[in-house]
Amino acid sequence: MAEPKNEDFLDDIATAEAEELAEELMDISEEELELDALRAERDDYKDKFMRALADAENMRKRSDKARRDAEQYGGSKLARDMLPVYDNMKRALEAATDEQKEVAAGLLEGVELTMRALKDVFQKHGIEVITPEVGDRFDPNVHEAMFEAPVPGTKAGDIIQVSAEGFMLHDRLLRPAQVGVSSTPAS
């Protein structure tokens, strides 16, 4: 009978070791679970931080672009309002006859100087004059067709008359050049 006691003793040791191991595993698994939860929370915060950083960078880029656009195109309303002044001064200079040029030479010289100063201001601020010529091809990106007429000796889409010059502000169209376009069909 001593042998069964011996085996019971071994069974008790095995059971005690198993219970101790189970407790350690439970402690380890609880620590692991807590560690996993902390890792997940860390990863979540890291993701939120990276997104916030990307949002801040995108906002900086958008504000830089908006600032550049404001610098380049902020005066476009004023520039558009100045275009009729340019047109009227040009018409005044073109309308002056030779007789009037002799009589009012000083006045016309003042208008020419003012026109030159206006062109210099336009150039300084990136405003370019679009000056199409008769015979050029109509380009809807920079020209506005005021009328179409069949004109012998031209092809459809050729400019046959320039009514008003157009203007670009850097790479944006302020006003299209106003032109007449040939509608002569190809023979």
Image (spheres, rainbow, N blue to C red):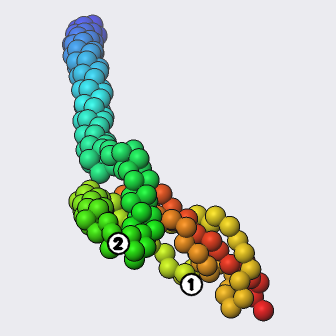
Residue count near mark 2 (Cα–Cα under 10 Å), binned few <14, some 14–19, many ≥20 = some
Q: Residue tagged by mark 1?
A: 135
Where residue 153 appears, as percent x and y from the top left, is 68, 91
Where residue 89 appears, as percent x and y from the top left, is 39, 60
Residue 80 numbered mark, or none? none
Q: Residue tagged by mark 2?
A: 101
Horizontally, residue 183 falls left or right of residue 95, namely: right
Label 1, secondary structure: give it.
loop
- Which sits earlier in the primary sequence, circle 2 or circle 1? 2
In this orientation, does residue 32 appear?
A: no
Give me the residue at 40% from left, 77% from top.
98
Give me the residue at 25% from left, 65% from top.
106
Give me the residue at 26% from left, 62% from top.
110
Q: Quadrant of residue 102?
A: bottom left
Q: Quadrant of residue 18?
A: top left
The quarter of the image holding the N terminus is: top left
Residue kind at label 2, given as amino acid type: Lys
161, 105: nearer the viewer: 105
In this orientation, does residue 182 appear?
A: yes
Give me the residue at 29% from left, 51% from top.
72
